[in-house]
Amino acid sequence: MAAVARYRVPGARIAYVMTDGAALPLALSDLVHALRERDVVDVTVTAGHAFGGDLEAVAVPSALALAHHVAGADLVVVGMGPGVVGTASALGTTAVEVAGIVDAAASMGARVALCCRASSADPRPRHRGVSHHVRTVLGLAATRPALPLPADLAAELEGSTVVVGPDAAEVLAAFDLVVTTMSRGPGEDPAFFAAAAAAGEWAAAAVRGREN
């Protein structure tokens, strides 16, 4: 997502907020290191018990405030670091933290979009197409974020918006990035990367809208 936003709006200032929903040291994330090295992400903020960001915050709301008001970010990407707890159930996963993040960001006046998890290759039926976790988060959140998705996936999710992002493999190659999900790259799981690209395209349009 961040790579697509950088690709579309090269001059944007992009921040990454890492929550404490999984690994706590930001240094454990090889991907964040690569994104910083390649100037895709400009600044990092760790929230809650997570640590090691350029800035550190007590909670996600204060991390959002730091990213915007101190770091001057045009776009803030929020998510946990490496690792996640899952129990093959709707509520038994740290991914449900996204509902609270959506509500906090919206209450602070941000334009909020959910980068939807999707897959065309996951062997587990609950994660094929738009993951059941997306619907769980939407059911828990008090506010409704934008849901940018490519056309085939948007048809699965009520209230989503069709957004066509660039080819994810081309964008990653442009930044010399290797990104996988469950050891699968863009060629092995195109739906996952198409959904992320759609979110990045939406974010880029939002940033351009602020600049105009």
Image: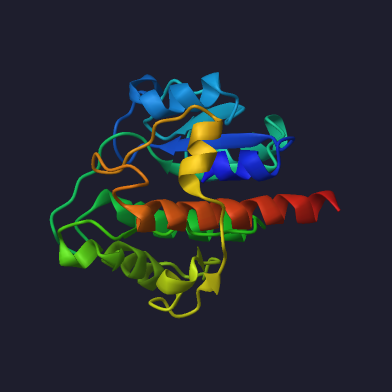
Q: In this view of the protein, which residue sits in the foreground, 69 or 171?
A: 171
Position in image of residue 103 (x %, y %)? 51, 60
Residue appearing at x 51%, y 52% in the figure: 197
Q: Is residue 58 above or below residue 74?
A: above
Q: In this view of the protein, which residue sits in the foreground, 184 or 77?
A: 184
- Could you say which quadrant of the image residue 71 lies in? top right
Q: Is residue 23 left or right of residue 144?
A: left
Residue furthest right as drawn: 212
Q: Is residue 84 left or right of residue 153?
A: left
Residue appearing at x 46%, y 30% in the figure: 177
Report whether residue 57 is seen.
no
Q: In this view of the protein, which residue sits in the foreground, 142 or 144?
A: 144
Residue appearing at x 41%, y 35% in the figure: 48
- Could you say which quadrant of the image residue 26 lies in? top left
Q: Is residue 50 above or below residue 54?
A: below
Report whether residue 73 is seen.
yes
Position in image of residue 112 (x %, y %)? 58, 59
Position in image of residue 212 (x %, y %)? 86, 53
Q: Is residue 193 left or right of residue 211?
A: left
Q: How many marks?
A: 0
